[in-house]
Image (cartoon, rainbow, N blue to C red):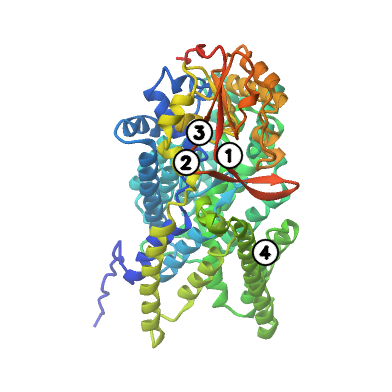
Amino acid sequence: MAQTETPTRPPPRWRTGPLATWALLVPAMLVLHPYAGLVQDARIYIGRGLADRDPGGLGRDLLFSEDAQTGFSLLRPLMRALLGAAPPDRVSMALVGIGLLAWLAAAVALARRLAPDRVAAAVVLAVLALPADYGTGGTFGYAEAIATPRLFAEAAVLGGLAALLARRPLAGLALLVLAAGLHPLMALPGFALAALLVLGSARRVAPLAVGLAAALAAGLLAAACGLPLFDRLFVVMDPAWADVLRARSVNLFPTLWPADAFAPIACRAAAAILAGGLAGDRPGGTPGGVRALFWGGTGVALAGLVLSLLFGDRVMSVLVTQLQPWRALWLLGVLGNAGLMLSVVGLWRGDAGARLTLAALVGAWATQPEPGLAVALAGLALGLAALSAAGRLRAVSPRVAAWALGAALVFAGSAALVGAAAVVALLLPLGRAWTAVGPWPYVLASGAVGSPLVAAAAALALAPGAGPARRSRRLALGAGVVLAAALAALVWDSRNDERRVVDARGGAAALDDALPPGPGGLLWIGDDSETWFLARRPAFFNAVQGAPGLFSRGLALEWADRARLLLGLGFARPSDVSLAAGSGQGDAVRLTPEAVTRFCADPRRPAGLVAPGSQLAAAPPGTEARLWSPPVPFRHLAEADGRLAWRTTDVFTVVACAASGAVLPAPSP
């Protein structure tokens, strides 16, 4: 009798798995990505929304009158509407909270296309806990807890890739289009990887090659015809503009990156390549999709870096420089960190050769402060994996592999302990005031939290699924959820006292009384957006104004001209103007009557300035000076004699220029 086969059903689209495992990820996301307030590029997008609502005031600021960046994002009109309903600090916090949850949901959806539930949860935890920065200087990172369109665009890209792996192309395309509407630059590598997933995973090499060639030809033809945007491809950035960007925005030019910026790239690429070779396809998924995801994502990121090196850094094509293809490294950051966990699980369960490969990989990640060694070990891991796959490491003794892996793990653990000790040494001089500086981000940066969490995630993934340990694991997970939720409630809002005052306009009434009248530009020395969010005035100069100079030559050159003026007067430091000059602040700026007179006589007719400390004697005749005290002392790290120390400012001097009634030029239409 012929046997009939029972048709197999695809697995359900969502199985909760152990509830505590998934529940742990929500507080873990909040603990590991704390809210920092109106900082970094959130200043641009929140400030843009305020400027749109006040075109005759804040809208006259140099950045917002010459803005050629935020108009490419759907977040701009949304931000303007939200700021009409709530103050900036609440809008920012709400957007970040929603964005982080959306990012987490997308990461979970993608991880579940890569591995079974328990391993998938460990993968997500590793992605959240491992360093997320890419480029140099820690300026950019994935899943940033700041109110920018990058956070939402990344979530849409990850969700789109997950949908493609699940054979849902329409949903995947819709999410990628949404990502492009939010932040086109972050979506570009997602589209490239999507093409590789759709065609490359099915081994349709010829259609893929034809499609890439057609896209390249269409772009070159559009540039040759002078179509808007594409016409910038053959335009070379002039030296004056390029010099400003090279000083202000080092990330745009990979040849200026320090060597330690390339160690994470090598380690993540090695982990992603290994994961692509180890991971198999999930039931109901795209055949070959997981391998195409990891290998294709690595290729897209490295190709973006090479494009930036050749055509943005060397040729200085305006279009390529503005597209910033090096930003595809954000995708390698996610895939590389996920690949590390998958590699740990897969190699640990292998033979002695596989564990020797794992030892090299762990050693590479642990030695990233020594980039040469890290890159060599990453290459060694790939070489050992190739030899193991060819069966040439069968003679390796299990004892040798165990010793090598143990040494790598001990070294990685000691690095986390050194980082924890450095944070204690940094915060100890503050005494009881250590809570005022928002210490949690410093703790996270040390690796004292991330490294143990990655180890715990690996243990979770490798633990047996059944047996006596199952109940203990569930109890540990339940306790972890409770503790993580309590910690998240305590540390997620990690703003320091100064940031809370600035974001919520604390003490604004007294400051408004002290500020000079009129809409002229205000110089707040050491400005970290105090002029925009605390004083609600156009800034004569601050560091963030130069960030969108990539998209506006006029803005870049005007910003640089103001920077030269302030450097000459001693009102700005090299680190305010050039990232290559280092970070931190040195000795406090001391005003002199001569310098204030020259500043107030500038043809741009500033309204006045705000300087730290009591400096009433520096006000020249014809000007007026007052003191303003913030509700709480402002504390920040300052560099003195080559060492970092905490500086406290509890009073500011406000000097009104005689020509305070002057106005700035009207915004460009």
Q: Which residue is mark 4?
A: 364
Q: CA distance from mark 4 to mark 2?
A: 30 Å
> What residue type is disc 3 on?
Glu
**In this orientation, which residue lies closer to the viewer: 490 or 381?**
490
Q: Which residue is mark 3?
A: 530
The residue that appears at 39% across and 22% down in the rendered structure is 54
> What residue type is disc 1 on?
Pro
Q: In terms of image quadrants, where is residue 223?
A: top right
Mark 1 nearby-residue class (10 Å; few <14, some 14–19, many ≥20): many
Q: CA distance from mark 2 to mark 1?
A: 11 Å
Q: Earlier in the sequence, mark 4 or mark 3?
A: 4
**In this orientation, which residue lies closer to the viewer: 307 or 257?**
257
Confirm or deny contact between disc 4 and disc 3 (CB under 8 A).
no
The percent position of residue 243, horizontal first and vertical second, equals 70, 27
Q: Which residue is mark 2?
A: 187
Q: CA distance from mark 3 to mark 1?
A: 32 Å
**In this orientation, which residue lies closer to the viewer: 512 or 532?**
512
On screen, 119 above or below 639? below
Mark 2 nearby-residue class (10 Å; few <14, some 14–19, many ≥20): many
The percent position of residue 251, horizontal first and vertical second, equals 63, 40
Mark 3 nearby-residue class (10 Å; few <14, some 14–19, many ≥20): many
Confirm or deny contact between disc 1 and disc 4 (CB under 8 A).
no
The residue that appears at 68% across and 34% down in the rendered structure is 578
Q: Which residue is mark 1?
A: 325
The mark lying in front, picked from 3 and 2, is: 3
Q: Earlier in the sequence, mark 3 or mark 1?
A: 1
